């Protein structure tokens, strides 16, 4: 540390030190991950860290998506026998914060892990997920839903949290779920066909709250008054920003609206929405 401090690579601030500039910090971090054993890497993940150090670690690891070692580690710890294969870890404050960073490293493994953690829970149990844990999970799922490849299971996780909503601000699980079905500024690469498949399944749910969310999603799809989206979810890892789906020609938008309107024409679904 003193050697790098003399060279101006490390900046001391009281009890804390940080590597500057950022590209060098990421390079040194990647060197460490490439030269250490999987056992040592897992120990680091499982070790409790002081608050600011843990925050820095989470921010740093999300930028190491280009490293096969970190991708493989994430896949292992998100497996059924891994650390994040346990629901109680993902649903803890520390675990959910680290999980939020890992989604940028390996979307497939983290999406599978979250789906396994949430699917056995009842809606009442999902409603008990609150505070920082719920915030971390909603932010994590927002990033996962951007990927077409993991859209289905990630969106179902968001739907479950929305059906068991306990937050009242705009970017809660409900707000993020409905945004995914807009024609423009949806925040996802998923095609209209993939999104309508989620709605069709939700319309058949035994839970009224899920069916009503599906109807509201259809209304979001046909809304022509525009809207806004907070920039951020498209910036993941070290690569180029992701691009959300948008119609290449107007007919693609018209087809999406017609498909949504056909589902809304159902008297059963419309009357259910009016009663709630």
Image (cartoon, helix red, strand yellow):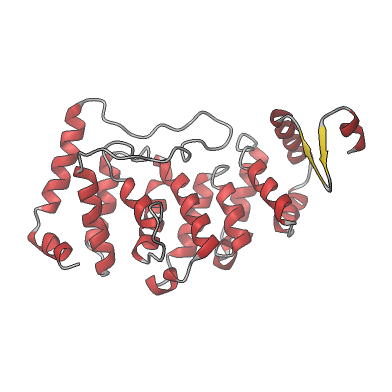
Say how many tags the image has.
Answer: 0
Observer-nearest residue: 227 or 114? 227
Asked where in the image residue 21 lies, by quadrant, the reply is top right
The correct choice, above or below, for 213 with respect to 31 in the image is below
Q: Establish if 24 lies above or below 229.
A: above
The residue sitting at the top extreme is 249
Q: Quadrant of the N terminus?
A: top right
* Residue 269 visible in this rendered orientation of the protein: yes
The residue lying furthest to the front in this view is 14
Question: Between residues 240 and 173, which one lies in front from this camera angle?
Answer: 173
What's the residue at 45%, 64% (across, down)? Answer: 118
Q: Answer whether residue 82 is visible to the viewer in this image.
A: no
Residue 205 picture quarter: bottom left
Q: Position of residue 20 (x, y in %)?
A: 75, 31
Q: Position of residue 5 (x, y in %)?
A: 87, 33
Relative horizontal placement of residue 7, taking residue 60 as reference (left or right) = right
Which residue is depicted at the point 46% across and 54% down?
A: 138
In the picture, measured across the screen, residue 18 lies left or right of residue 1, that is left
**Residue 194 at what x, y percent from top left?**
30, 44
The residue lying at 81 percent from left, 35 percent from top is 11
Q: Nearer the viewer, residue 227 or 156?
A: 227
261 sits to left or right of 185: left
Which percent across, then down, holds residue 43?
A: 75, 56
Above or below — where is 51 with respect to 126? Answer: above
């Amino acid at each position: 540390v003193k050697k790098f401090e003399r060279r101006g690579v490390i900046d001391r601030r009281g009890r804390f030190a940080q590597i500057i500039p950022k590209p060098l910090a990421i390079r040194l971090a990647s060197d460490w991950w490439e030269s250490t054993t999987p056992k040592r890497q897992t120990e680091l993940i499982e070790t409790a860290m002081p608050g600011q150090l843990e925050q820095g670690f989470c921010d740093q690891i999300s930028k190491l998506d280009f490293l096969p070692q970190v991708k493989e580690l994430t896949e292992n710890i998100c497996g059924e026998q891994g650390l994040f294969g346990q629901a109680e870890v993902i649903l803890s404050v520390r675990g959910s914060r680290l999980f939020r960073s890992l989604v940028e490293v390996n979307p497939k493994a983290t999406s599978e892990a979250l789906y396994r953690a949430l699917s056995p829970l009842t809606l009442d149990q999902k409603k008990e997920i609150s505070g920082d844990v719920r915030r971390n999970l909603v932010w994590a799922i927002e990033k996962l839903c951007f990927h077409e490849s993991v859209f289905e299971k990630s969106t179902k996780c968001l739907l479950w949290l929305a059906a068991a909503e306990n937050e009242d601000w705009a970017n809660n699980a409900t707000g993020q779920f409905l945004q995914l079905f807009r024609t423009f500024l949806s925040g996802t690469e998923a095609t209209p066909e993939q999104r309508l498949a989620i709605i069709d399944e939700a319309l058949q749910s035994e839970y009224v709250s899920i069916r009503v969310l599906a109807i509201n999603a259809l209304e979001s799809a046909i809304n022509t008054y525009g809207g806004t989206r907070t920039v951020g979810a498209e910036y993941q890892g070290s690569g180029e920003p992701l691009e959300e789906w948008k119609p290449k020609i107007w007919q693609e938008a018209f087809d999406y609206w017609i498909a949504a309107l056909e589902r809304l024409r159902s008297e059963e679904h419309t009357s259910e929405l009016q009663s709630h």
